[in-house]
Image (cartoon, rainbow, N blue to C red):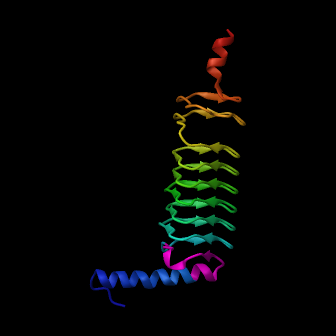
């Protein structure tokens, strides 16, 4: 079809979205409300992916097998490995890498971050420019400073300063521990 004005452009986009949705479903994706899911030309979905209502895929998105993307998510420039659960109302921004079995909760925004296997980011959380280790849980209302290191199994219950190294339950800065023992 010819595109001579914005109305023609909107019609061409609708035709393209219909084709992209049909292609995704033919390859094994379940779109719970196909007319509300929007794809980029390069969206790549794995097998047995379930996509909820009102999900938008920007450019550069790859989704692994058996992933669930709940309603009202926006994903752009991100890689999601198999068996992850995203959303609802989550936003994955460019540079985000989600490993296997990761859970990203509702109203979570992630930017330029690696979430390793089994990590869990609870609701109402922003994680940016970070590396979250395997099995870690990130909760709302805490600030982890730049270059801070959180030890395996640490229970972080308050903000962590820049360049701190915290361990234990509850998490304590190793530098504070060393000073108090001298």
Q: Is residue 22 left or right of residue 6?
A: right
Figure quadrant of residue 159: top right
Count of marks, rendered view? 0
In the picture, the quarter occupied by the N terminus is bottom left
Q: Which residues are magenta?
A: 23-39
Query: Magenta includes 28?
Result: yes
Q: Could you say where residue 158 lies in the image, as x and y percent from the top left?
A: 58, 31
Left or right, 88 with reference to 47: left
Q: Position of residue 111 (x, y in %)?
A: 50, 51
Is 89 a magenta residue? Answer: no
Q: Residue at x 45, y 82 (%)?
A: 16
Residue 65, x across and y down, in percent:
68, 68
Q: Quadrant of the C terminus?
A: top right
Tell me the residue at 63%/83% (across/down).
26
Does residue 53 sit above or below 101 in this rendering? Answer: below
Compared to 131, does 12 lie above or below?
A: below
Front one among 58 and 137: 137
Q: Is residue 149 above or below residue 135?
A: above
Residue farthest to the left?
Answer: 5
Q: 73 left or right of 180?
A: left
Q: Quadrant of residue 140?
A: top right
Residue 117, relative to residue 71: is it above or below?
A: above
């Amino acid at each position: 079809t010819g595109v001579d004005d914005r109305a023609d452009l909107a019609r061409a986009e609708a035709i393209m979205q219909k084709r992209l949705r049909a292609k995704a479903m033919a390859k094994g994706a379940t779109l719970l409300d196909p007319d509300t899911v929007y794809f980029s030309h390069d969206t790549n979905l794995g097998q047995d992916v379930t996509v909820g209502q009102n999900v938008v895929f920007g450019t550069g998105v790859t989704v692994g097998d058996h992933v669930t993307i709940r309603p009202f998510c926006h994903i752009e420039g991100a890689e999601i490995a198999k068996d992850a659960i995203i959303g609802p109302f989550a936003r994955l921004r460019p540079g985000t890498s989600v490993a296997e079995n990761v859970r990203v909760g509702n109203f979570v925004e992630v930017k330029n971050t690696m979430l390793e296997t089994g990590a869990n980011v609870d609701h109402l959380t922003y994680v940016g420019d970070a590396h979250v280790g395997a099995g870690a849980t990130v909760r709302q209302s805490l600030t982890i400073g730049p270059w801070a290191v959180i030890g395996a199994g640490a229970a972080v219950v308050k903000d962590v300063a820049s360049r701190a190294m915290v361990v234990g339950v509850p998490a304590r800065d190793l530098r504070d521990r060393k000073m108090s023992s001298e």
